[in-house]
Image (cartoon, grey):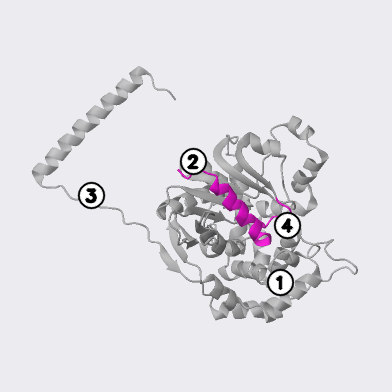
């Protein structure tokens, strides 16, 4: 709001009065010998971290898998009523008798991991620096039911590119508050906007004043919030999901049949989990936190639905990586805590004003089996799209399903940006 001349003069008068008062107090303090050095705030520590799950937790998991009480399934059905019992039994048996958490844990522990506290919440993150000088800081943000594991295959290629002409990156991969070792959350309000604020603080605490952000699923929404909150710091967003609601009914009426099909996800039955987790995640958490098979089946159903597969999601995602993702939620006790992001978003979304145009450059990777894709004309009304890539294959979990395609697109996008 513009200040009138009177308001400016009045403000100046108050400033002069305050300066005089400070001067008088300062003079008195000197005279009395009472001046003390201003106490500096201690910096919040960033602590090195290594994963280690107690044997007792892993033994309890195996016991629960061995003692599972199984439901029936209608003869002749597979996925028509939800997670197919054949696939759930297959993976439950492997999880109990073949899967090796310790091997996966050791692989993760080869990466540089840390924790710090922001806004009263522990934040766990991977911070893998590139050996190349001038590397671009890049934060990679997961969603649900993903985790830091989504980006494991991206770390090496991004930090140590073989081509000296390709940009190199310092990679920062946080677990979102409430997920994995960044959870559980202990206060209300940890929706996407608050998470974005915490991650902006994290990048500042790491000493990065200019950086890029990549995300899909909730990571996309959080990345966009970071750009709105810190536009002078975020140099670019690379997103593999952009959700835009229609501006009006006229826009909906103008959609082509193909656009309607790609946008109709939230009108279809398979999106029911989204609304359930947004309405009563606590109720769902009792069952999924207590039953290892129940949690496994819930995750299998989502990966079967959301990946670009030929009828079996394990053709799109590595089996051990999938089970490590499933196990990470289980052993950290964050199944319920992570689902709360849906509820927190619903509770705060009504407070959000219409989205203004985002000036930050955006690279958009459009994977063909992404589940909720608005018309591109809607996207460009809000976002500054400087690069769009129509990918030949891949679904919702882009980093897991097609890491090479995603890395190449990230490099291409950030190579064209003015890093200043």
Give the residue pinned by disc 4.
306
User: Which residue range is magenta in the image?
Assistant: 391-420
Residue at 76% across / 75% down in the picture? 90
Q: Which residue does the numbered mark 1 point to in the structure image?
A: 293
Tell me: residue 239, above or below residue 311: above
Q: State how far apart marks 4 and 1 are (Cα).
A: 20 Å
- Of residues 146 and 77, the one nearer the viewer is 146
Q: In the figure, 398 relative to 193: above or below?
A: below
Q: Earlier in the sequence, mark 3 or mark 1?
A: 3
Q: Which residue is mark 3?
A: 38
Front label number (4 vs 3): 4
> Is residue 157 shown in magenta?
no
Furthest toward the top, the residue is 5
**Label 3 Cα crowd, 10 Å radius (few <14 / some 14-19 / many 20+):** few
Quote the CA–CA distance across marks 4 and 2.
Answer: 32 Å
Q: CA distance from mark 2 to mark 1?
A: 44 Å
Secondary structure of the residue carrying numbered label 4: helix
Residue 198 % position (x, y): 48, 51
């Amino acid at each position: 709001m513009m200040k009138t001349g009177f308001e400016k003069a009045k403000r100046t008068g108050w400033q002069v009065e305050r300066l005089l008062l400070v001067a008088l107090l300062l003079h008195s303090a000197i005279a009395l010998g009472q001046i003390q050095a201003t106490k500096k705030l201690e910096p919040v520590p960033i602590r090195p971290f290594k994963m280690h799950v107690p044997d007792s937790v892993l033994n309890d998991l195996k016991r629960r898998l061995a003692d599972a009480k199984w439901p029936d399934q209608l003869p002749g059905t597979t996925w028509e009523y939800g997670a197919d019992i054949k696939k759930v039994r297959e993976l439950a048996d492997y999880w109990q008798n073949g899967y090796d958490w310790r091997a996966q844990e050791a692989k993760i522990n080869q990466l540089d991991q840390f924790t710090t506290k922001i806004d009263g919440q522990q934040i766990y993150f991977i911070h893998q620096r590139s050996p190349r000088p001038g590397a671009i800081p890049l934060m990679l943000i997961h969603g649900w039911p993903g985790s830091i594991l989504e980006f494991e295959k991206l770390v090496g290629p991004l930090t140590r590119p073989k081509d000296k002409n390709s940009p190199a990156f310092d990679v920062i991969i946080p677990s979102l508050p409430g997920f994995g070792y960044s959870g559980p959350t202990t206060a209300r309000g940890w929706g996407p906007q608050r998470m974005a604020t915490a991650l902006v603080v994290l990048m500042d605490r790491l000493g990065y004043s200019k950086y890029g952000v990549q995300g899909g699923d909730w990571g996309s929404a959080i990345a966009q919030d970071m750009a709105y909150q810190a536009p002078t710091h975020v140099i670019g967003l690379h997103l593999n999901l952009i959700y835009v609601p229609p501006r009006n009914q006229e826009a909906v009426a103008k959609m082509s049949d193909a656009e309607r099909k790609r946008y109709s996800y939230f009108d279809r039955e398979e999106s029911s989990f989204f609304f359930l987790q947004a309405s009563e995640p606590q109720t769902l958490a009792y069952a999924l936190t207590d039953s290892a098979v129940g949690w496994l089946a819930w995750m299998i159903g989502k990966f079967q639905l959301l990946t670009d597969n030929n009828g079996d999601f394990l053709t799109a995602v590595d089996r051990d990586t999938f089970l490590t993702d499933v196990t990470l939620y289980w052993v950290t006790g964050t199944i319920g805590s992570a689902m709360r992001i849906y509820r927190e978003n619903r509770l705060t979304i009504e407070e959000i004003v219409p989205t203004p145009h985002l000036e930050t450059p955006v690279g958009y990777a459009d994977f063909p089996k992404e589940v909720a894709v608005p018309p591109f004309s809607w996207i460009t009304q809000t976002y500054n799209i400087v690069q769009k890539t129509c990918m030949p294959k891949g679904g919702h979990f882009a980093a897991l399903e097609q890491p090479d395609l995603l890395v190449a697109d990230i490099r291409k996008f950030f190579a064209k940006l003015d890093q200043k």
